[in-house]
Image (cartoon, grey):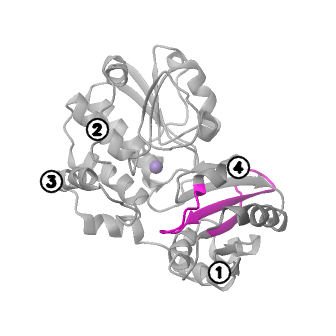
Amino acid sequence: MKEFPKPSEEVLASIRNCTTAVVCGHGGPDGDCVNSVAAMGLLLKALGKKYYLINDGPFFRTEVRFIQDLITEELPEEILNKNTLGIVVDCSTPSRLGSKSSIFDNLTVTVIDHHSSGEQFGDHRYVVPESISTTLLVYQVYKALGVEITKEAAQYLFRGFATDSGYFKFLHENSGETLRIVADLADCGVVPNDEYHYINGGKPFENLQFLGKIINRIERLYDNRVIISHEEREDFKLYGDNSRASDEFYGQAATVEKVQVIFFFKISKREENSIEVGIRSTHSCSFDAGAFAALFGGGGHEKAAGLTISGTYEEVKEKILKAVEKYLD
Ligand SMILES: [Mn+2]
C-alpha cells in the first residue's frame, strides 16, 4: 500500500466526543490484538477519557501476558448504554469477541481492523485490509487526533506490527509507507533489537522440546505440497499446555521445497471436543488461507488463518485434507 487511508471524520469524532469507552479485541489474542488494545488505552488516557480495556484470554503466550494487568473483568452496569463508545480492534466478527461479544450490543461501536474477511458490524468503521497490522491503524488514529506517541505507546504499536509482519518477513512491495511509520516509532524510542528479544525470548525449555516432538510428527501429503503436524493431550503433561512451538514449526515447515500449505491441529481449549486448525500458506503459492478457513467458519488473512471444527483429530484431519486438494497449485 502506497499510502494509508486516513480514518474518517466520523470515526475520529466518535473517539473525540465520547466520555467513556470500552476497548476489546478478539479472544485468544495475539500480539497485534493486545497491543492495539493497550495502545488505544493510552490514547484514551491522553484524551482524558474514562476507559476500560477488556479481552477474552487465554493469555499464555509470553508477548500477550502483560495485558492481564491492564484489563478489567467487571464493567460498571451504568456505562452499558449507547452513550458509551465500544472500540473493537483487530476483530472481524462480533462472535470472535467471545464472552465479551454481548457487551457491544448495548454500546455505540467503532471498529478498527485490518482483516479482509468478516462482517460489516459496528456504527463506525476504520477497516484497512492492506495494513499489515491493526496497530498501524491505531497509529493513524493517534496522528489524526494529534495525540503524542510516547515511548510506551510506540512500543505497543511496534509490537503489533512485529507480530503480524513476522518481524518484517511478510512485507511486500510498496511497503515504504509502512517502514516510514516504523521509522517514526524508532524515533519515538523503540529499539527493534530489544523488542525482538521481548517478543521471542524468555520461553520455557519445554517449548523447545515440544517443537522437536511436533517436527517428529510431521506428515507430508500431495507431493510435498501440504505439511501437517498436531498436538496430543499427552503433550500437555510433558510440556505444559501453553506452548507456542507451533509458530516455529510453521516457520521451519515453510522452508521445505514445494510446500504450499501447512496445517497444525490443536486440541481446542475454548470449545469442547473440538480441534483448532492453524493454517499457513507459503510465499509463492496462490492458496488463500483466509478464504479456506472461511469455508469452515474460520477466518484470517491470505497467508495465515485459523478455524475450529468439532470432532476428533482424525475426523477433522480427514475433512481438511479432503477439502484442500482442489485449492493447491
Ligand atoms: Mn492483526
Residue 188 in percent (x, y) is at 17, 51
Task: State the SS at label 3.
Answer: helix
Q: Reading the chain from its start, which is encountered first: label 4 or label 3?
A: 3
Q: Which residue is mark 1?
A: 224
Q: Nearer the viewer, mark 1 or mark 2?
A: 1
Circle on res. 174: none
Task: State the SS at label 4.
Answer: loop
Circle on res. 295: 4
Residue visible at 62% across and 55% down?
Answer: 306
Kind of residue at disc 3: Asp
Kind of residue at disc 4: Leu
Q: CA distance from mark 4 to mark 3?
A: 43 Å
Q: Nearer the viewer, mark 1 or mark 3?
A: 1
Q: Which residues are magenta?
A: 262-289
Q: Nearer the viewer, mark 2 or mark 3?
A: 2
Kind of residue at disc 1: Asn
Q: Reading the chain from its start, which is encountered first: label 1 or label 2?
A: 2
The stretch drawn in magenta includes residue 218: no
Pick the front one: 184 or 179:
179
Q: Which residue is mark 3?
A: 187
- Disc 3 residue crowd, few under 14, some 14–19, many 20+, Cα 10 Å: few
